[in-house]
Image (tube, rainbow, N blue to C red):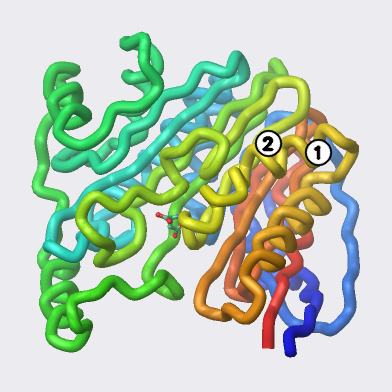
Amino acid sequence: MHRRKFLKNSALTSAAVLGTAPLISCAETGTKTSQKISPGRPVTICTWDFGNATEKAWSVLNTGGSALDAAEQGVMVEEADPENQTVGLGGRPDRDGIVTLDACIMDSKSNCGAVMGLEGYVHAVSVARRVMEETPHVILAGDGASQFAAEQGFSRTDLLTERSRQEWMEWKKTSKYTPVINIENHDTIGLLTLDAKGDLAGACTTSGMAYKLRGRVGDSPVIGAGLYVDPEVGAATATGMGEEVVRTVGSFLIVELMRQGKSPEEACREGVHRIMKKNAGRTDFQIGFIALNTRGETGGYCIHPGFSYRQYDSKGHRNTPVESYLKS
Ligand code: ASP
C-alpha cells in the first residue's frame, strides 16, 4: 500500500535576515499548510542548500545584472567547489572512473544551450552558454563538446579529485560494478532567476548520477526536462532521478501547469504526483522540482523530506513552503 503524507515546510535556519539566505526544508507534520510570500523581483532560487550559489546570483541581480548572467554565475560557484561532489570539479565519476558533466542554460527569449557528457572542463554551464551564443546548435555532446570547449578557450582540468577517486575505488569493491539508482549520491544544482527588468533565466549543471554507466545522460542538460524557461509564464528546474524527469518532460510540464493557472508550488506538486503515478510501488528514487513565475512567486515540491531549496528576493530572504510526497 502506498499513502501520501504531506509535509510542510519548516524553517531550519536563522531568521530571514538580509545577507543570509533561509534554508527551506521539509519536515513531517501530517498536515498541509501554506505560507504566502510577496511576489516581486529580482528573485533567485536554487535546488538544495547551495547558499553560496544563490548569494552569487543575488549579487549579480542586485547590482542590475541580467537574469542570464546571474544564473550562470550562480551555478559556477558550485561547479568550482571541489568539496561539492555532485557538480563540476570533484564530481563523482561514472562507472569507469571518469567525471562527465551535463549542463544547460536558457534565457527569456527561448535561447538555450547544453552540453552532455563533457569531460575535462569545470564550467560546463559556461560551455553550454557558448553553445547557445556562438553556434547555431542547442546541444553538443561528448568529444565534440570537449573539442568545442577547447576551441572556445576554456582550460582543461582534471575533474577527478582524490576524494572522489578514493570513494569510487571503494564503491567498486562492493558494487558488483553496476550503478545504483541515485538515492543519496546526487544533488544537481538548478538555479532560476528573475531580474529587475522582468527577464527570466535558468541554469542547471551536474556530474549526474554517481557511478553511472559510461555515456549515461540524465535530465539536467535536456531542455524541457531538467530546465525550462518561458517568458510568458515562468521557469522550472528539476533534481533527482533524471530518467523519470525525462520521461515526463518535467520542467516543461511544470511551466505548462503554471500557464494553466497553477501556482509554482501547485505545479511542482502535480509534476511529482504524475511521476509517482507512473512508478507505483517504487521507493528507490527522489525527484524535486522548483519553480518561479513571472510575478516572482516561487514554489517547490519533492518526493523526499530531505529536499530543500534556497531563495533570495528583494523583500529580504524568506521561507517558502515545500511539501513532500512520501511513500511508505
Ligand atoms: N538529475 C540528475 C541526473 O539524473 C541527478 C540529480 O539531480 O541529482 O543526472
Name the quarter where the C terminus is drawn: bottom right
Q: Nearer the viewer, residue 12 or 248?
A: 248
The structure residue drawn at horizontal position 65% and vertical position 61%, both measured from the top left corner, is 275
Residue 254 position, x and y percent, is 71, 43
Q: Nearer the viewer, mark 2 or mark 1?
A: 1
Disc 2 on helix, strand or loop? Answer: strand
Residue 27 seen in this snapshot? yes
Q: Which mark is on residue 21?
A: none
User: Which three-letter amino acid code belongs to the residue tagged 1?
Assistant: Met
Whether residue 183 sits left or right of residue 134 in the image: it is: right
Q: In which quarter of the image is residue 313?
A: top right
Disc 2 designates what residue?
A: 43
Q: Residue at horizontal 52%, vertical 48%?
A: 246
- Nearer the observer, 256 or 277: 277
Which residue is found at the position 89% from the left and 79% from the top?
Answer: 31
- The spot of residue 89 in percent (x, y) is 23, 50
Residue 57 pos. (x, y %): 52, 36
Label 1: which secondary element: helix
Q: Is mark 2 within 8 Å of ligand 1?
A: no
Q: Residue 113 vs residue 273: left or right? A: left
